[in-house]
Each structure stands twice: as structure tokens, then as C-alpha cells.
């Protein structure tokens, strides 16, 4: 590894090239007018006939942000907003599935839910998956 350039743009590109797995290439940064974002794509070696190569795409409001995002993705760094939104959506689906399972079980015995049943079922819900960086009951 050589000396890191002083120019932030060059340093960002240097970091991306340093993070690339062997045999991978990176394309130019391009601006998508429809999305109003810059993007840059890294592509793995071609896996064979009829198969698409693995790609990793970084995006951002300018070229530097897009290259920085690609570097973070190549290194496996989490994206805070995206991770939190996915986890919240997953927790919502888990809560609904838990409640639906209890509803189905009650229907199997020919019963319908009343307020006491809802409180009892929700009281047994084990809880959401913790959000990274948050302290849940500890």
C-alpha cells in the first residue's frame, strides 16, 4: 500500500481501490438524473457463461459521498439509517406474525379475541430485536 494522497477525492478513490477484493474492478462515478444521486460500481470477475458478476454499488449526493459509500460497503461497514429502517420493518412483521399466530390458534378452538385475550397474548410477546447501539432493558 502506497502513501495516501492529500486530496480528499484522490484519497477516497485510493481507499476504494485498496478495499477491492482481488480480481475486482471499479467503474467511473456517474450522476443519475432520475435519482439525483451519484453512483459508482465495483464489479467482481465474471463467474462464467450466463451468470452475472457480483456488483457492489455506492451512492451519494456527490462523487465523494458515492465513493465513500462504496468504500464502506466493500469493507462491510453498516449504514445506520438503512439498518435501523430494515430492523424496524422486521420487528413490525414479527409482531404481526406473533399476533396472527395467536389469532389463528384461538380460531382453531372456535374462540374470538376479547380485550383480555389481546393483553394476555401481547404480554407473552418476547419483544423486538434490539436496535444496534441502543440499550434495551439493561
Image: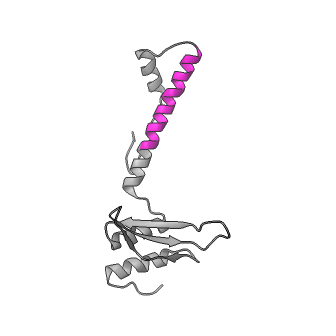
Instruction: Give the vertical position of 62 relative to 105 (above or below).
Output: below
Can the viewer see residue 57 in this picture? yes
Relative horizontal placement of residue 106, taking residue 12 as reference (left or right): right
Residue 72 figure quarter: bottom left
- Residue in view at x 39 percent, y 84 percent: 4
Does the segment drawn in magenta span residue 91? yes
For the C terminus, the quadrant is: top left
Residue 46 figure quarter: bottom right
Relative horizontal placement of residue 51, taking residue 12 as reference (left or right): right
Q: Which residues are magenta?
A: 89-109
Residue 116 percent across, percent down from the top left: 42, 15
- Residue in view at x 34 percent, y 73 percent: 64
- Residue in view at x 67 percent, y 70 percent: 48
Residue 12 figure quarter: bottom left
Task: Find the residue positioned furthest to the front.
Answer: 34
Residue 109 percent across, percent down from the top left: 58, 14
By secondary structure, the bulk of the magenta-drawn segment is best described as: helix
Task: Find the residue positioned furthest to the top.
Answer: 110
- Residue in view at x 38 percent, y 56 percent: 80
Residue 36 percent across, percent down from the top left: 32, 64
Task: Find the residue positioned furthest to the bottom.
Answer: 2
Amino acid at each position: 500500500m502506497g502513501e495516501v494522497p492529500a486530496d480528499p477525492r484522490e484519497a477516497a478513490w485510493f481507499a476504494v481501490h485498496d478495499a477491492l477484493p482481488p480480481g475486482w474492478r471499479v467503474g467511473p462515478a456517474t450522476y443519475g438524473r432520475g435519482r439525483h444521486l451519484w453512483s459508482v460500481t465495483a464489479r467482481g470477475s465474471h463467474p462464467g457463461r450466463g451468470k452475472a458478476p457480483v456488483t457492489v454499488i455506492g451512492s451519494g449526493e456527490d462523487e465523494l459521498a458515492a465513493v465513500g459509500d462504496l468504500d464502506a460497503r466493500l469493507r462491510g461497514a453498516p449504514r445506520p439509517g438503512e439498518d435501523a429502517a430494515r430492523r424496524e420493518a422486521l420487528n413490525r412483521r414479527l409482531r404481526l406474525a406473533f399476533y396472527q399466530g395467536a389469532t389463528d390458534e384461538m380460531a382453531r378452538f372456535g374462540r374470538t379475541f376479547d380485550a383480555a385475550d389481546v393483553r394476555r397474548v401481547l404480554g407473552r410477546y418476547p419483544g423486538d430485536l434490539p436496535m444496534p447501539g441502543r440499550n434495551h432493558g439493561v
